[in-house]
Image: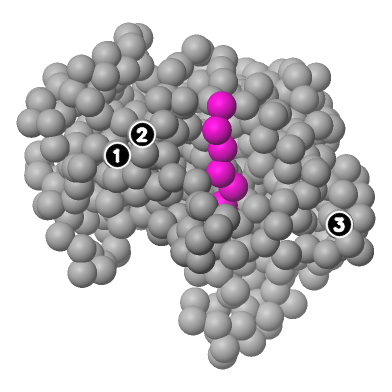
Amino acid sequence: MDARAGTHPETVDRLIDVEQRRFAASHPRSADAWARGRQHFLYGGPSHWMRRWAGGFPVYVEEARGCHVRDIDGHSYVDFCLGDTGGMCGHAPEAVTRAAVRQLERGTTHMMPTEDSLWVGEELARRFGLPYWTLTTSATDANRGAIRISRMITGRDKVLVFSGCYHGGIDEAHVELQEGRLRMRKMIHPNGVDHSRVSRVVQFNDVGALEEALAPGDVACVLMEPLMTNFGMIPVTDGFHDAVRAITRRTGTVLVIDETHTLSCGPGGYTALHGLEPDILVAGKAIAGGIPAGVFGVTTGIAERLWRIVPFVNPRQRQSAHFGIGGTLAGNALTVATMRAVLEEILTPENYAGMIARAGRLAAGARATIARHGLPWHVTQIGARAEIMFSPAPPRDAAEVAATRRGDLETLLHAFYMNEGILVTPFHTMFLMCPATADADVDRHAEVFGRFAGMVVEAGAA
């Protein structure tokens, strides 16, 4: 199925050309910086993600505070991207800055714990309901740790993921379903990994397929988001979580829930909000206020099984305590200090209430615009996050996203937004609120989105 059938794609392409020319003309300093960056960075910027902006090159940031960004060309933006969740606490939040400066003056990395870590461990256990935690430098590392532990305690090799997922740089998760068969995700090299041996993939919300995939008893863990957020937001269907938990328990499969994005649902993420019961829970990005960090927590049952394999080190013996998880920078004092500031002062119930309310305000405004123009688009909101998708109804799985999404309209929207001072997640059209997001910022979006919709309708490009 061609999602552009019945439309005029050449019209959208012309509109994209107009917006990209407008962007280039108004961002000469960023254009020059991008040209310099391409001389020495493999993909133009310090991270290859930085190239993924619809203007043809990224803006170079001069300063960011709260939910506002100013670039080196002097343009200001309302930021709903927030570093694709890494900045969910807002840019330069005072509590994080204060904690970071204090710890920088006291030492950042010494591979020994600080008293702040005691508070952080207790708070993670209280929020998420799992008693034992480990800190990492990213959610990718936390997922790696969860997978390694699952394999160690089950003796199994396979990891099951859902088609369209994203769990960082995890090799096992770089697969998808194509015509019912496991294939590599677009542009991802297999990296020497035999994915047929270590990966299994099914569609999200498909209980029957999950049952069949886990029946052989060779899957170490199911790695999943509570609802999918990286391939376009895919809501969870009624009863799916109960089925996943029942099937994984019956087949002896470890259930790993990755809350890296869905932490936007509340202080304890989607898991606490909906009473889920993971064996291992992963979070990252936002949890240290923009300082690179990840965490994973395990149940008592998982911890006890692991301790039987890797016991505490006997201090009278000289031996390695390394078993393939973490690194020397994991749990460093700077990260722990900023994580405590985030959990204690920023990601509070009061701040979440405001963030969620503003996400609801943005979603309602976008729905009103869509209805007013009679457009075949929809809006999904979950917690402090919302997404506009250019298809008639929320998808059930990645196959429906692939069949109905309008990548051309997404590119046009992103380019138009940047020209109008709005930033959204560049990989799809997802909006995230931070504590500093105000009603005026949301209303600014409503005005810009209204003009975008009018432009598309007038051009006959919807």
438 is higher (above) or lower (below) than 307: above
Front-lying residue, 223 or 413: 223
Q: Is residue 462 left or right of residue 425?
A: left
Q: Residue at x 29, y 45 (%)?
A: 152
Q: Which residues are magenta?
A: 131-138
Mark 1 element type = helix
Spatial CA distance of label 2 from label 3 is 36 Å
The residue under the point 35% across, 49% down is: 148
Instruction: Report the residue marked by disc 1.
Output: 153
Q: Nearer the viewer, mark 3 or mark 1?
A: 1
| Among the two numbered marks 1 and 2 on one chain, the one whose residue lies closer to the N terminus | 1
Give the percent coordinates (x, y) of residue 286: 65, 43
136 within the magenta span: yes
Marks 1,2: beta carbons within 8 A? yes
Q: Residues within 10 Å of mark 1 (few under 14, many from 20)?
A: some
> Mark 3 is on which residue type?
Gln
Measured along the vertical axis of the image, is residue 148 above or below residue 432? Answer: below
Asked whether disc 3 touches disc 1, contact meaning CB atoms under 8 Å apart, the reply is no
User: Residue at point 68% right, 66% down?
Assistant: 59
At label 2, the amino acid type is: Arg
On the image, numbered disc 2 is attached to which residue?
Answer: 305
Of pointers 2 and 3, the one earlier in the residue sequence: 3
User: Mark 2 Cα within 10 Å, few/some/many (few <14, many 20+)?
Assistant: some
Residue 439 seen in the current view: yes
Task: Say which residue label 3 marks.
Answer: 103
